[in-house]
Amino acid sequence: MTSRIQSATPGEQQGEQATGQAPYPTAAGTVSGLQNGRAGRASLDELHETARRIAANVERVLVGKPDVIRIALVTLLAEGHLLVEDVPGVGKTSLAKALARSIDCTVSRIQFTPDLLPSDVTGVSIYNRQSGDFEFRPGPVFANIVVGDEINRASPKTQSALLECMEEHQVTVDTSTYHLEEPFMVIATQNPIEMEGTYALPEAQRDRFTARVSIGYPDQQAELAMVDEHAGHNPLADLEPVSDRESVQRLIETVRSVHMSPEVRRYAVDLVSATRQAPEIRLGASPRATLQLVRAARAQAALSGREFVVPDDLHTVAIPVLAHRMVLTTEAHAARRSATDVVRAILHRVPVPQGSSGTNHR
């Protein structure tokens, strides 16, 4: 492997924000319906406590961004992939690394550059002169959590190397297929496409990311704390795991069993269908987006201590899950309408199911 591919080791990069409090209360919910489930599934109490510990760990590096951290946890529990998009220096890589290091599992980091090759990501077959056979050397994508730094600085050819990995959790090289270990999550960072030396991610690539978040600048209090406490110290260097791969896999099993009523499922389909009919949108969300919206809503419900999904769970995750998948019309761009604005309008326009079991009343 080339020097552009690195493992995420402590002290590799300066942390960019200061410490803070976890965005979750200490006490877990009282829901007990999932606690006596089949083997391999965690209780909602255990899920809530583990999520609280991970969030507190991440906030040691990224302060004042509980909503961003929560979406990152939702994406992890929904078996998805996270795209972090923002300007340089606001903590994109720090968020990705802090989440990865909070879980005791295999982690790798890829620094995407214009000359990075697909084989640098997936691996390559090398001829062994002693045995006379080709041997497969796995690339950095063979890890539980893969941190892709500045993914949109690589060419579309290299970006496409992740398509099969992210969707099917496998890699095909020279007609041989290699399966990736579960759980598998890609946390990619990217700079705005207006910045020099970047390539816009293709629609097929964006569609494989469950959610996209923007961190934004910290408030003055958080930035002052960063200067006071971390100007000469890297908080990532002291970050220790607070969970492990097996525990996360059990939490994922719990999220899979969260109930979603037929009315709420129909509401999720109606929201995604509305993106395909909105006049401001040239390309709406795909059926894959519907599946990931449902999975994210289940994770959001579990983090809220419930064993069932309500419409508010869909509202919470709709913008991170749907906005980055849509292509706006030229007229919408001229009117300075963003995909986020369009999703908000759809949430207000599509009727919320009323009076059904497991839904709220709005």
Image (tube, grey):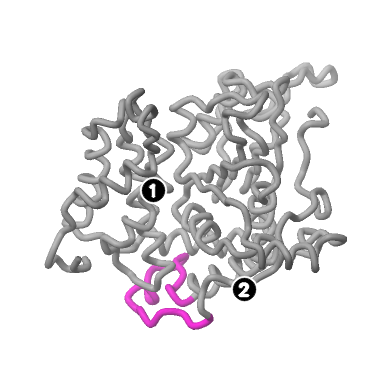
Q: Which residues are magenta?
A: 26-45
Query: Which secondary structure is most common in the magenta stretch?
Result: loop
Q: Residue lying farthest right?
A: 232
What residue is disc 1 on? 319
Picture quadrant of residue 336: top left
Q: Residue at x 32, y 25 (%)?
A: 331
- In the image, what residue type sits under mark 2? Gln
- In the image, what residue type sits under mark 1? Ile
Secondary structure beneath disc 2? loop
Q: Is residue 295 above or below residue 116?
A: below
Residue 101, image x and y in percent?
69, 57
Residue 159, image x and y in percent?
58, 26
Q: Residue lying farthest front?
A: 335
What residue is disc 2 on? 21
User: Is residue 12 rendered to the left or right of residue 28?
Assistant: right
Q: CA distance from mark 2 to mark 1?
A: 25 Å
Query: Earlier along the polypeptide chain: callout 2 or callout 1?
Result: 2
Tell whether position 39 is magenta. yes
Picture quadrant of residue 229: bottom right
Crowdedness near tag 1: few (<14), some (14–19) or many (≥20) residues, C-alpha within 10 Å:
many
For the N terminus, the quadrant is top right
Tell whether position 189 is magenta. no
User: Is residue 296 rendered to the left or right of residue 127?
Assistant: left
